[in-house]
């Protein structure tokens, strides 16, 4: 299983027939140079390629990507010459690749490509780069630790988080059952099938670090590609026998004094059953319970209505007058995708989105680049790494609040720089439509809501004669459409809600009862929190992945956070097995002080400080979704289990509630 994952990160053996000089020249002309220089330095074991004069600049510009690491033309020319020479040497030496770099050498390579990173960052970066391979795998095995002990874990959710949780636990010899309400794996990528659905994070940064895919078709792939990646991962990892699909978990009950969990579930045939597990991992996601706002008269509307996450493929939009409510990430993708097909499209917008110029958003990756990914060992890994490095912490500075900043529409000088750059981008696109321009520039600071990827298709759609952007608030639905506050009735045959999700209602789809019969929702009282986003006091051995305050706006990677949370959970299991305990229960003081720190830092970030609606905040106005600190802080917090943060529940013996 582990080996299968390893194969996915190594490019196929180079094929000599493919390595003509002409081929090399065209590949180098297309290559991402910082990644190729580092790759060649590694595989040829030659520091000439990581010449400090060719070091990329990792400080990203406010809008747009960092082209060729910020190297000027002359340095790009030199880099290309070096790369061409290096590829020829690699070919002429019979494609000999040395062993994976030892730590000191890896440090030199990282120092070239990510030189702003200080030493404390290097372990995180090596993990992300997957050198050495699969460093996140558990360093223990259940039967070696305690040959007498069985340990069963229920994983709820077979999406990106649940699959990696199941895989890691199995690597440690722990028995897992993965429940998912859907008939297939994939989670959000299974459920969201709306037209235009694709990634809006760079594709090469959106795969497990230890199961990288060297041949994505696009820079930002379609949902079908991500779904196929997850299906292949589950196959390679041998997860099929552990999956219980079309099975809805309805309740979790912590049993005292046995200190285990009774998991009640409903199978596809409607029958309910209960099974007992030593621990539960909830990997149910944050964005899977569609939010459909209530509007006056909604039930009167005679046309079809649906949510983007429940796309009605049985309805042919051709010839219909369609309304789309909401202009967040989902609406922004669906509007351009259906504008041509429908007879008329009315887009109901409350707040416009800020958009990041991304010209290659829907482009396929060039053949030459794919050739490099396939033929040159490690190139895809360094390429992925550079995408990750330049798109995480680098953007955090744009989102920090300066308490002395008074200008409306931004929260600091850096945030203002970003606001101006993004405003210029919108102004250029809508210069010929001043009537629209006024409505597409947000009044709130950039970063207060999710920044969307824009290749111009949004402006092209809104500027069509058969598309109307409506910014008056919705007053009511009628039998024939939607009436806005200005009194206009917009006649419609169908209404599509791209109105987001009930993101802050963590685990609300099941009833969870912990120690002393505490109900999880009562304990949270509408304000879900967790220690490290993972554990909650009085709910021992219940672990959350992508839990409260683990989402990212600009400063992180959900895939990496998921991996780190899972590695931590596996370590908690190790620690309790090693100590002969039944369970660990997070201490309330650790939980409270951790969350106080998170809250204080979120107030210093634009998404916490800005007074604008967003799914990052819960109904109390607290930011319950987002992680505010640098990525490194989460890495450090999840490397070791702090015994002081937990109360041990021994086994066997009666359980005593603190
Ligand atoms: P969202 O960002 O929460 O957007 C919801 C939209 O509906 C907003 O425009 C909101 O307006 C509007 N809305 C909500 N209630 C309304 C009401 N009562 N009346 C009028 N308008 C209303 O939801 P989403 O677009 O589904 O995106 C959610 C998250 O999912 C994203 O931020 C992202 O993390 C993820 N996502 C990712 C991708 C991707 O990777 N490609 C694609 C889609 C979604 P206001 O702005 O005024 O609140």
Image (cartoon, rainbow, N blue to C red):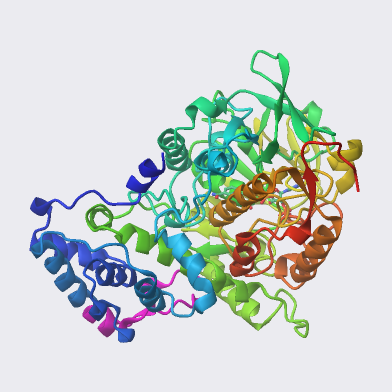
Query: Is there any visible trace of residue 466 in the rendered image?
Result: no
Horizontal placement of 239 versus 577: left or right? Answer: left
256 falls in the magenta region? no
Q: Position of residue 384 (x, y in %)?
A: 40, 60
Horizontal placement of 329 versus 60: left or right? Answer: right
60 falls in the magenta region? yes
Q: Position of residue 40 (x, y in %)?
A: 25, 69
**Which image quadrant for residue 107?**
bottom left
Numbered range of the magenta stretch: 54-78
Q: In the depicted view, which residue is nearer to us: 201 or 259?
A: 259
Horizontal placement of 161 versus 374: left or right? Answer: right
Q: In the depicted view, which residue is nearer to us: 194 or 538?
A: 538
Residue drawn at x 10%, y 64% is 93
Q: Position of residue 364 (x, y in %)?
A: 34, 51
Horizontal placement of 154 versus 518: left or right? Answer: left
Determine whether 120 is above or below 618 in the image: below
Q: Position of residue 345 (x, y in %)?
A: 59, 41
Residue drawn at x 26%, y 58% is 377
Q: In the depicted view, which residue is nearer to us: 350 or 255?
A: 255
Query: Is there any visible trace of residue 172 in the rendered image?
Result: yes
Residue drawn at x 72%, y 27% is 276
Q: In the depicted view, which residue is nearer to us: 329 or 543?
A: 543
Determine whether 74 is above or below 46 in the image: below
Residue drawn at x 75%, y 32% is 261
């Amino acid at each position: 299983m582990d080996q299968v994952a390893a194969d996915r990160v190594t490019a196929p053996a180079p094929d000599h027939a493919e390595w003509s000089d002409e081929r090399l020249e065209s590949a180098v002309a297309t290559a991402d140079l910082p990644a190729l220089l580092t790759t060649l330095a590694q595989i040829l074991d030659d520091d000439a390629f990581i010449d400090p004069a060719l070091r990329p600049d990792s400080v990203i510009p406010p809008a747009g990507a960092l082209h060729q690491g910020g190297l000027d033309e002359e340095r790009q020319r030199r880099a290309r010459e070096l790369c061409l020479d290096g590829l020829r040497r690699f070919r002429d030496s019979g494609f000999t690749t040395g062993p994976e770099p030892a730590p000191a050498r890896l440090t030199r390579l990282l120092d070239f490509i990510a030189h702003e990173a200080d030493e404390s960052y290097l372990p995180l970066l090596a993990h992300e780069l997957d050198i050495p391979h699969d460093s996140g795998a558990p360093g223990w095995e259940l039967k070696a630790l305690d040959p007498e002990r069985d340990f069963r874990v229920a994983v709820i959710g077979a999406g990106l988080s649940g699959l990696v949780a199941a895989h890691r636990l199995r690597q440690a010899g722990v028995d897992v059952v993965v429940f998912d309400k859907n008939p297939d794996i994939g989670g959000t990528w299974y459920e969201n099938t709306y037209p235009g659905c694709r990634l809006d994070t760079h594709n090469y940064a959106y795969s497990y670090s230890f199961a990288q895919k060297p041949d994505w078709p696009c820079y930002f792939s379609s949902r079908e590609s991500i779904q196929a990646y997850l299906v292949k991962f589950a196959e390679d990892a041998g997860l099929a026998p552990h999956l219980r699909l079309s099975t809805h978990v309805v309740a979790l009950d912590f049993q005292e004094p046995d200190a285990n969990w009774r998991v009640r579930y409903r199978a596809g045939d409607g029958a309910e059953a209960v099974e007992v597990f030593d621990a539960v991992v909830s990997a149910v996601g944050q964005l899977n319970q569609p939010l459909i706002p209530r509007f006056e008269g909604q039930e009167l509307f005679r046309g079809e209505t649906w949510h983007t996450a429940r796309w009605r493929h049985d309805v042919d939009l051709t010839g219909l007058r369609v309304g789309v409510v909401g202009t967040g990430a989902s609406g922004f993708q669906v509007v351009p995708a259906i504008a041509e097909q429908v007879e008329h499209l009315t887009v109901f917008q409350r707040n416009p989105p800020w958009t990041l110029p991304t010209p290659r958003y829907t482009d396929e990756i060039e053949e030459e680049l794919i050739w490099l990914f396939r033929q040159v060992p490690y190139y895809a890994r360094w390429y992925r790494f550079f995408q990750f490095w330049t798109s995480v912490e680098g953007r955090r500075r744009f989102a920090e609040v300066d308490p002395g900043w008074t200008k409306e529409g931004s929260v600091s000088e850096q945030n203002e720089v970003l606001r101006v750059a993004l405003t210029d981008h919108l102004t250029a696109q809508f210069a010929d439509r001043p009537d629209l321009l006024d409505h597409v520039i947000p009044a709130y600071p950039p970063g207060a809501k999710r920044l969307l990827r824009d290749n111009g298709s949004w402006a092209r759609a809104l500027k069509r004669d058969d598309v109307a952007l409506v910014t008056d608030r919705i007053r009511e639905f009628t039998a024939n459409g939607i009436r806005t506050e200005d009194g206009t009735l917009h006649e419609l045959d169908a209404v599509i809600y791209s109105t987001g999700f009930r993101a802050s209602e963590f685990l609300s789809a099941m009833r969870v009862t912990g120690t002393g019969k505490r109900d999880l929702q009562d304990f949270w009282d509408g304000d879900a929190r967790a220690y490290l986003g993972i554990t909650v006091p009085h709910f021992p051995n219940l672990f959350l992945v992508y839990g409260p305050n683990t989402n990212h706006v600009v400063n992180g990677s959900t895939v990496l956070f998921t991996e780190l949370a899972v590695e931590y959970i596996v370590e908690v299991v190790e620690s309790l097995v090693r100590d002969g305990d039944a369970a660990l229960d997070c201490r309330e003081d650790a939980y409270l002080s951790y969350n106080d720190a998170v809250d204080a830092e979120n107030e210093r970030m634009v998404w916490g400080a800005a007074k604008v609606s967003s799914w990052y905040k819960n109904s109390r106005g607290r930011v319950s979704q987002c992680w505010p600190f640098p990525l490194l802080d989460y890495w450090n917090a999840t490397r070791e289990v702090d015994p002081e943060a937990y109360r041990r529940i021994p086994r066997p013996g009666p359980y005593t509630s603190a």
